[in-house]
Image (tube, rainbow, N blue to C red):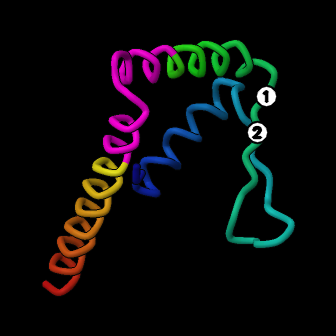
Amino acid sequence: MDIEPATLVRVLDRMERDGLVARSASAEDRRRNAIKPLAKAKPMWKKITTTAERVRERVVEGLTPRQIATFKEVCRVVQANLQVEEAGAKQKVAAK
């Protein structure tokens, strides 16, 4: 899943404003920030991970391990196809 940098910055700005994360300059690369979750984010994170796990379980309910493996492989191929298509579209826009 790709997130545009500008979108990510806005999300992080809101999370920082709401006291969920803290940003600090990366020691290794001045162009980067380190993102640290704060205590206020822990209950929210627990709810998100619990919900994600329930969704994962529901998605594969009734499928055999082989079917799950096939499903994952198909998803990887679809994602790769979409990334190639997106990269091509960005190149066309840049060329204009």
Q: At 39% from the left edge and 15% from the top edge, which residue is drawn?
A: 58
Q: Which residues are magenta?
A: 54-72
Disc marking residue 22: 2
Mark 1 = which residue? 38
Is residue 67 located in the magenta-colored stretch of the structure? yes
- Residue 56 percent across, percent down from the top left: 45, 23
Residue 57 picture location, percent across and down: 46, 18
Of residue 45 and residue 60, the one placed in the foreground of this image is 60
Q: Residue furthest right?
A: 27
Relative to 67, say whether 42 is above or below: above
Q: In the rendered image, which quarter is residue 38 located in?
A: top right
Sooner in the amino-acid sequence: mark 1 or mark 2: 2
Left or right: 28 in relation to 74:
right
Label for residue 70?
none
Q: Is residue 50 above or below residue 90?
A: above
Q: Say what secondary structure mark 2 lies in.
A: strand
Spatial separation of the CA atoms under disc 1 and disc 2: 7 Å
Q: Label 1: few (<14), some or many (≥20) within 10 Å?
A: few
**Residue drawn at 40 percent across, 42 percent down:** 69
Measured as percent of width and height from the top left, residue 32 is found at 69, 64
Q: Amino acid at mark 2?
A: Ala
Q: Which quadrant, please, contains the C terminus?
A: bottom left
- Tell which of 11 and 83 is nearer to you: 83
Instruction: Give yes or no for contact between labels 1 and 2 (Cβ–Cβ under 8 Å).
Output: yes
Judged from this view, the residue extending furthest toward the bottom is: 95
